Image (cartoon, rainbow, N blue to C red):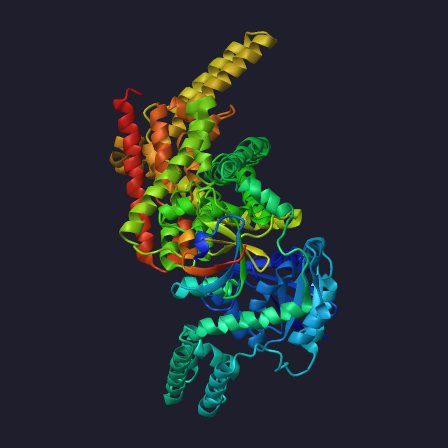
Amino acid sequence: MTPKRLTIALAGNPNSGKTTIFNNLTGTRQKVGNWPGVTVEKKEGHVSRFGYDLTVVDLPGTYSLTPFSIEEVVARNFLLDETPDVVIDIIDASNLERSLYLATQIRELDCKVLFALNMADMARARGMRIDDRKLSELLDVPVMFTIGNRNEGMDELLKAAIALAESGAPLPRSRRVKYTYDIEEAVGRLRSFMVSKCDGSLPYPPRWMAIKLIEDDKIVKERLIAAVPDEAGRAVLQAGQSLRQHLAARYDEDPQIVMTDERYGFIAGIVREVQTAGTRQRVDLSRSIDLVLTHRLFGFPIFIFFIWAMFQMTFTLGEYPVQWIESGVKLLSDTVEGLLPEGAVRGLVIDGIIAGVGSVIVFLPNILILFLCIAVFEDTGYMARSAFLMDRIMHLIGLHGKSFIPMLMGFGCNVPAIMAARTLESEKDRILTILITPFMSCSAKLPVYVVLAGAFFGARAGTVIFGLYLLGIVLSILTGRLFRSTLLRGADAPFVMELPPYRMPMAKSLLIHMWDRSKIFLGKMGKVILIGSVIIWALASFPRDVSYSRDFEAELRQAAAAAEARQAAAGDAESREIQAAYEQTAAELRRLQKAEQTEHSLIGRIGRFVAPAFAPLGIDWRGGVALLTGFVAKEIVVSTLGVLHAAGEREEENALENALADSGMTPLAALSMMVFVLLYLPCLATTTAIRRETGSTLWMLFSIGYSTAVAWAGAFLVYQGGRLLGFA
Amino acid sequence: MRLSELKQGQTAMIARVGGEGHLRRRILEMGIVKGTEVYVEKYAPLRDPMELIVKGYHVSLRVEEAAQIDVEYVA
């Protein structure tokens, strides 16, 4: 017999420890995908426990089920349409009153729900005691205690969830929020009217639908019309509307507001009965930490220090593993060279696949560290403080402090950053944030800076790169102001944001966080970059029968013969010297041959075609081609430069840097190219994300056009301005 | 008086939440409802937004948003 399947949904407020519990329950057996139709992250895990196949779904963290934000819509639709066997509502025990707001809304949905009072240890430390039996009795809901970050109570929670799912008991009808007489009467009337008019075809529980119609819930109204498209549906809507108006006149207030008030009134009653509060205000470590981190004078310097430290860690600490990977890639390349015969296949494998993927994988350590730092900011609670600190400034650009979070994530990868813009409630805010996020220099652009700045600015490379990041930030601010006063005029969303207590991050959750995001980078590399590298290798390698300006093959044979002849007449030591000298000459000849071949290749022709557009920026045709190929993914700029400068043929370390310096590029031209890379059109994956998140191809095209125009103008100013000022 | 007129460390009772649709509903849903006690924990370094303690948790609001909330001064 196959084990029975059950679906368990985890609901709860943001910062309630929901994700920690999800990680505890499912371990690493997680599937991260998207909710259908939207790109809110959907986390799902499968476990076989206690004789059941359990699917655990992590709903987006929300404070309510009123469909304001996409997260709330997604969470509610899952509960309504997928009808999980049981819902576990995770309640931050130290935050009982506010958590119960969501809980009462879930209760109203008439699904099987179980409360997990999480972090009860912290509540106790704050002198708070919760009577779980009383709570369970008052709301007619099973209540369990859990301590997510110590992995306590997980088995009991699962067992209770299974027991609840399997219990045939009818859903408890009582113990729900009871509204005041007038509202209850209106709800009751609308409910019976609805049942009499369209019984059987109602998509959801009638009482809940009646409440939502009185609250003027757009989605429920649409669903009703979709399910009951005839006269009856319209009649119900009309009845709801007139009851709404009646109540609005009666209370001189929007009924939804009255009902929110009453839910909190109901909750206050419960909290009084079940919670014995200790000290009313928290005098704890978290508050003391916050007094320093958001201090009037020290707050900003500390914030800037953290950002600076993040970049230092990323680039200095990441340097060591980068070197190991570099040697590994070289070893692999050498091994393959020995195994395969010379020809197109060897070229494809070494110069296409290994060189292309290799030049990107070396930056994996940097990216892992960066994502780890961002995960630390998020899991400690500092991310919310950064929004608190930055809101005033972001508000000047016409943005919400929360926009700072996606923008900061943009430094890692624009794709998750643009997805993170969903946390913004106002659509204008979201579009504006999405439009300016690509100016945040993503980690894929970093390899380009590292190579160019490393080759031309030596010890000052770090400063140059820091300057580039700064330039991106400044331009995003200017863009924000410009668009807020023209294209996207209007007020920004309210800044009502929880500042969760500081928490010690858990290693496991940090790692899962970091890995989930790095997987996006790796996945991109696996598919897009591999294909991109191969296409570029092919464009650069064909046609293969090029008529060279010199006969390289003959020269190579000549050099070999000459060396052999001299070696025959020389002693041991001298012979080795001759051999070394010959190898150097041969390598140089092969490099020149390769470069010339590339020049005549398909990509060389494309490059020459677009070269006039890049000439005023001081970028040669090779740079132009590299930039074009960077549309696939920014990392490819480096590998294209590698191929075009035939860096793979060179034996020494930092081959590409040296090749670039030899090619006649000036530091000014390198700076201009870096500015162009910083600003120009977002990569393929990002443009796809922009299209999906704004829901409009027009915005995507606008973003591409705008950023490329800014990039060209920026690089032009740098190069021509620099020349006027006398830099070469 | 208005919530935005409170100084750091002062406590008040919410009397009425004004404002429009979105903002108002969000504020109410976060538990800032009539009769709730609020404590002004601090203002951000740039004097905006402000941090409040409501129902035992910390929440931030912009000063202009807090200006739409009427309160009764307690202490």
The location of residue A527, given as percent across then percent down, is 48, 49
Residue drawn at x 49%, y 16% is A582
The quadrant holding residue A279 is bottom right
> In this orientation, which residue lies closer to the viewer: A422 or A141?
A141
- With A163 as the anchor, is A222 left or right in this view? left
The location of residue A665, given as percent across then percent down, is 35, 25
Placement of A376 over or under A467, stated as above or below: below
Q: Is residue A142 visible?
A: no
The quadrant holding residue A171 is bottom right
Q: Is residue A672 visible?
A: yes
The location of residue A498, given as percent across then percent down, is 53, 55
- With A14 as the anchor, is A393 left or right in this view? left
Residue drawn at x 61%, y 44% is A288
The quadrant holding residue A492 is bottom left
- With B73 as the anchor, is B56 left or right in this view? right
The location of residue A608, given as percent across then percent down, is 28, 35
Q: Quadrant of the N terminus of chain A?
A: bottom right
Placement of A295 over or under A617, stated as above or below: below
Q: How many marks?
A: 0
> In this orientation, which residue lies closer to the viewer: A494 or A264?
A264
Residue positioned most to the bottom: A196
Residue drawn at x 59%, y 74% is A107
Q: Quadrant of the C terminus of chain A?
A: top left
